[in-house]
Image: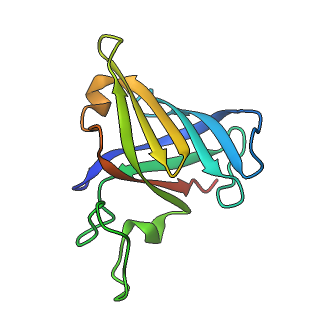
C-alpha cells in the first residue's frame, strides 16, 4: 500500500437504499479482500454504480507527492495524482470511530454531508483516526 493509503480493496454493490434525496444515492457494498461492509452516499449524477457492480475503493490521506489532505487540491502544473486513475472522488473527514464490538471497528466519515460507514475487523481499519482528512476514490472495474 502506498504512503498515505489507509485502505484499498475491491467492493461489490450488494444493495441500493431507497432514495431520500434527488441527487444522493446510498449504496451498501461488500469487499472482496478484507470482508468489510461499506455504506456510502454518493452524488447520483456523478457516480453511477449499479447492483452487483464491482469497483475499487481507495481511501488515502494524500493524492500523491505534494498533495496533502489538509490543503485544497490545486495542481496548476498538471502533476500526476491518484485522481488521474479515479472515476469518482470525494474529500472529507473521519468524524467517529466506533470500537464497541471487540476486534471490530466502524469508521464514520463525512464528505460535505455525504456519509460513509466502513465496518470490519480492527486490523484492517486501525490506521484511521478521528478528525483525519481523507480522500475517497472510486475506480469502476472494467468487465
Is residue 80 found left or right of 84 in the rendered image?
left
Looking at the image, residue 1 lies above or below residue 52: below
Q: Which of the colour schemes (rainbow, by chain, secondary structure, one colour) is used? A: rainbow
In-front residue for pair 74/39:
74
Q: Measured from the top left, where is residue 30 in percent x and y? A: 54, 31
Q: Residue at x 65, y 39 (%)?
A: 26
Q: Residue at x 31, y 31 (%)?
A: 124
In the depicted view, which residue is nearer to us: 70 or 142?
A: 70
Residue at horizontal 30 percent and vertical 67 percent from the top: 71
Picture coordinates of residue 17, whole percent (x, y): 71, 33
Residue 62, compared with residue 115, is above or below; it is below
Quadrant of res 127 = top left
Q: Residue furthest top?
A: 102
Residue 135 point in image, percent of width and height: 40, 55
Question: Taking 105 as reference, is 16 above or below it?
Answer: below
The count of marks equals 0
Q: Position of residue 28 (x, y in %)?
A: 61, 33
Image quadrant assignment for residue 100 = top left
Indicate left or right for 122 with 53 as reference.
left
* Quarter-of-image position of residue 3: bottom left
Where 59 sits versus 126, above or below?
A: below
- Residue at 56% across / 48% down in the picture? 55
Amino acid at each position: 500500500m502506498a504512503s498515505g493509503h489507509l485502505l484499498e480493496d475491491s467492493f461489490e454493490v450488494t444493495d441500493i437504499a431507497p432514495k431520500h434525496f434527488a441527487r444522493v444515492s446510498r449504496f451498501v457494498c461488500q469487499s472482496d479482500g478484507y470482508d468489510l461492509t461499506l455504506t456510502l452516499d454518493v452524488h447520483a449524477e456523478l457516480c453511477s454504480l449499479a447492483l452487483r457492480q464491482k469497483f475499487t475503493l481507495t481511501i488515502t490521506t494524500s493524492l500523491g507527492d505534494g498533495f496533502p489532505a489538509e490543503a485544497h487540491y490545486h495542481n496548476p502544473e498538471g502533476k500526476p495524482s491518484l485522481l488521474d486513475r479515479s472515476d469518482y472522488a470525494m474529500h472529507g473527514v473521519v468524524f467517529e470511530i466506533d470500537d464497541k464490538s471487540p476486534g471490530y471497528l466502524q469508521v464514520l466519515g463525512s464528505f460535505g454531508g455525504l456519509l460513509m460507514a466502513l465496518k470490519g475487523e480492527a486490523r484492517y481499519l486501525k490506521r484511521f483516526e478521528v478528525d483525519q482528512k481523507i480522500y475517497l476514490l472510486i475506480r469502476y472495474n472494467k468487465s
